Image: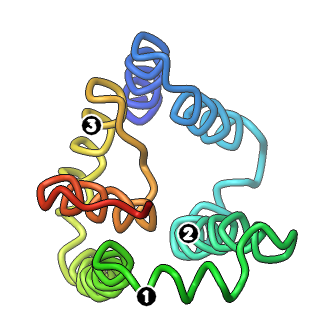
Amino acid sequence: MQSWLFLALVLVVAAIGKNMSLVIASVVVMALKLIPYTRQWFPVIQAKGINWGVTIISIAILIPIATGQITFKDLWQAFRMPAGWIAVACGILVAVLSKYGVNQLAAVPQVTVALVFGTILGVVFLKGVAAGPVIASGMTYVIISLLGLSFH
């Protein structure tokens, strides 16, 4: 019963905060709880879901390459300016930090509760996005803004 109340609270907070991603996620998890025999999927989704999500985000990131919107010329131009190097460094930093984060979650599962709560607060009340790979872009934006640089 406690899990239903917690999920309902997340759903309400997400709805109030007008965060459709979290609303949809809450509804999907609640629906899975209602469908018989789906609880056996929970450990698989919990273990593999992040990787599936990262794969989908990676596909979305690669689409502009497939459509020709991003070319080798664009890559070359990115390396010709400080903002491009900052973006590469942020991408590397996020990948390394994510590795340690995944290891910590496996070693100390109690951190997950605080992480989920913090993510919900950040997404709903601060209009953040619950997507790890996007962090590199946000870090790049902050650093470039602080240094007064641009990609133009």
Left-right relation of 83 to 69 = left
Measuring 77% from the left and 41% from the top, which residue is drawn there?
A: 35
Q: Secondary structure at mark 2?
A: helix
Disc 2 or disc 3, which is closer to the eye? Answer: 3
Where is residue 7? Give x, y as percent. 45, 30
Say which residue label 2 marks: 43
Say which residue label 1 marks: 79
Q: CA distance from mark 2 to mark 3?
A: 25 Å
Q: Name the foreground residue: 136 vs 104.
A: 136
Q: Name the foreground residue: 33 vs 96.
A: 96
Say which residue label 3 marks: 122
User: Which amino acid type is marked by label 3?
Assistant: Gly
Q: Is residue 72 above or below residue 140?
A: below
Local crowd size for mark 2, using a 10 Å CA cut-off: few (<14), some (14–19), many (≥20)? few
Q: Secondary structure at mark 1?
A: helix
Left-right relation of 24 to 38 = left
Disc 1 or disc 3, which is closer to the eye? Answer: 1
Q: Residue furthest right?
A: 67
